[in-house]
Amino acid sequence: MVWGAIAGAVISAYSAHRANKAQQAEAEKNRQFQSGASDTAHQREVADLRAAGLNPILSGTGGPGSSTPGGAMAPQQSVAPGGAQTALSLIRQRQELKNMRGTENSSTLRNKSRTGQPPTLITNLR
């Protein structure tokens, strides 16, 4: 039971890490594309003016130039919350088991004292 929860937390953290790496790679590709588009904005504007039959010198008048696509960011998934939640769950389960053992021990002692048998504690439950 404990090892299954730990394995689940490790797999979850690894999956989030892999997803983050893939998203970072895609964002980097997008930033490279945007850089290329920004670097050639003037050339594209001149080509557009020529295609429209206008004088390309108009591109030097301080206009906005050709459009450049917006920036890209890679959304990141947190790797820790799944593992932290699993750790808290394991701590809670251990405490519940201790509580159940204590309840069972006190019930056993109470029952044996009523029947006159010598008390024995249950300690081998894990």
Image (cartoon, rainbow, N blue to C red):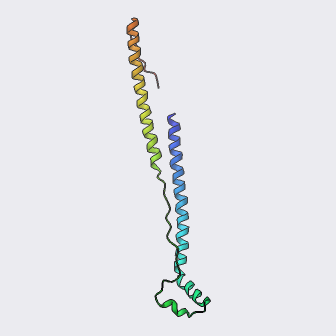
Residue farthest along the right direction in this orientation: 51
At horizontal 52% and vertical 52% (from top left) the residue drawn is 16
The image quarter containing residue 53 is bottom right
| 33, above or below 91, in the image | below
Q: Which image quarter: residue 97?
A: top left
Q: In the image, 22: left or right of 85?
A: right
Q: Residue at x 47, y 90 (%)?
A: 61
Return the residue nearer the eye: 92 or 64. 64
The residue at the point 53 percent across, 50 percent down is: 14
On screen, residue 1 above or below 114: below
> How many numbered circles does the render carry?
0
Q: Position of residue 90 (x, y in %)?
A: 45, 36
Nearest the camera: 18 or 46?
Answer: 46
Q: Residue 122: x percent and y percent?
A: 43, 18
Residue sitting nearer the eye, 64 or 86: 64
**Looking at the image, which residue is at 49% across and 35% down?**
2
Question: Which residue lies most toward the top here?
Answer: 116
Q: Position of residue 113 (x, y in %)?
A: 37, 9
On the image, the x and y values in percent for residue 104 come to 42, 19
Question: Relative to 99, is 35 above or below?
Answer: below
